[in-house]
Image: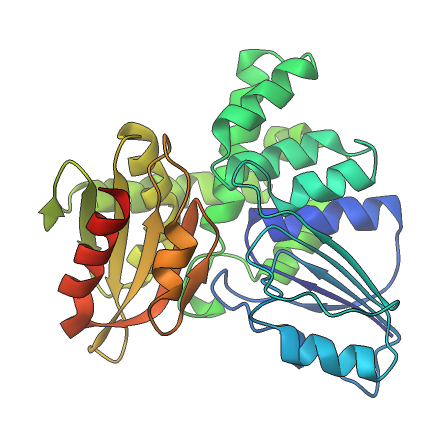
Amino acid sequence: MIFDVFNGDADGILSLLQLRKANPQDSKLITGVKRDISLLKKVSLDQASHVNVLDISMEKNVLALTELLEKEIPVFYADHHRSGDIPASSLLQAHIDPHPNTCTALIIDNILSGEYHLWAIAAAFGDNLNSRAFQLAKERGLSEVQAKLLQELGVLINYNGYGASVADLHYDPAELFRLLMTYDSPFDVIDDDSSPFNVLKSAYSDDITRARSEKPQHNSDILMVTELPNSAWARRVSGVFGNMLANESPNKAHAVLTKNLDGDTYTVSLRAPLNNKQGAGDICASFATGGGRAAAAGINALPINLLSEFIDTVEGGYR
């Protein structure tokens, strides 16, 4: 059995979409909310004949990856997060590029020689690689209006991936992938009044309006910290709201906090300054349950009593 393991955000979904449009195959889908990245351990060692892994950190999944390789199961792995030491195996086809101006969908786009380039551009927008995505759209000959539609689609797919569990989301990421696969082009999704695009567009507008009403609890020349309440809408909007703030104030870092159900910890979304896209992954990885990439990272459970330490760490990292 083929297993497709992918992040539940725009980058993971649209990476797999490109692969499956290029090579349609029945497969077992393993995904989840965006922060659920320890996915490879869910692959059945007894059932797997081949595994494709997209947009989840190899560093966070290396033990499960090693087990697959030891069982002589071939693995295709594409990602743009911190990889750690990549296992040496002829069964592992690794395409890892942690550059802050790329994403997994663009890695797949390169492998497929741009066969599904519009989907890759939408994914880049979803990962907040706006400058790169607008440049790619221009090179493709798209109008500004078309580029902004792809941006909106990417942001909405990404928005759907945030939550404490799939119950917080509007679509299970596996189901969203299946729905998007039925469209030939991202513009077909946008043009269909009954598509996920239009469902998510309305929900996103409501959630962003609520987030906008929250005042920052820390705001300096280096870092803005905004806490959102412990509610499904806040968990859904945390990542895309952080991206929005980063675009509005590109010279400072932005952290969006949502209190977890335990009442003792925060989920943290950290965005490096857009004009200095480095360090976020290392900062978050210095805290338990933290990690990510240079431009955008997070912490799944930051103890409330460590918030001041987190703020000091971020301030020091970008001072």
Q: Residue at x 49, y 67 (%)?
A: 166
Q: Position of residue 234 (x, y in %)?
A: 29, 56
Q: Position of residue 312 (x, y in %)?
A: 17, 56
Q: Tell me if I can see residue 204 in this picture.
A: yes
In the foreground, 300 or 155: 300
Q: Residue at x 36, y 61 (%)?
A: 284
- Quadrant assignment, res 37: bottom right
Query: Vertical placement of 50 versus 297: above or below?
Result: below
Q: Residue at x 60, y 34 (%)?
A: 122
- Quadrant assignment, res 304: bottom left
Q: Position of residue 94 (x, y in %)?
A: 76, 57
Q: Is residue 69 left or right of residue 211?
A: right
* Residue placed furthest toward the bottom: 46
Quadrant location, the C terminus: top left
Number of marks in picture: 0
Q: Tell me if I can see residue 182 in this picture.
A: no
Q: Position of residue 10 (x, y in %)?
A: 57, 47
In the foreground, 209 or 223: 223
Quadrant location, the N terminus: bottom right
In the foreground, 283 or 27: 283
Q: Is residue 163 left or right of residue 308?
A: right
Q: Residue at x 89, y 50 (%)?
A: 23
- Quadrant assignment, res 187: top right
Q: How is the image coloured?
A: rainbow
Query: Vertical placement of 264 versus 218: above or below?
Result: below
Query: Vertical placement of 113 versus 284: above or below?
Result: above
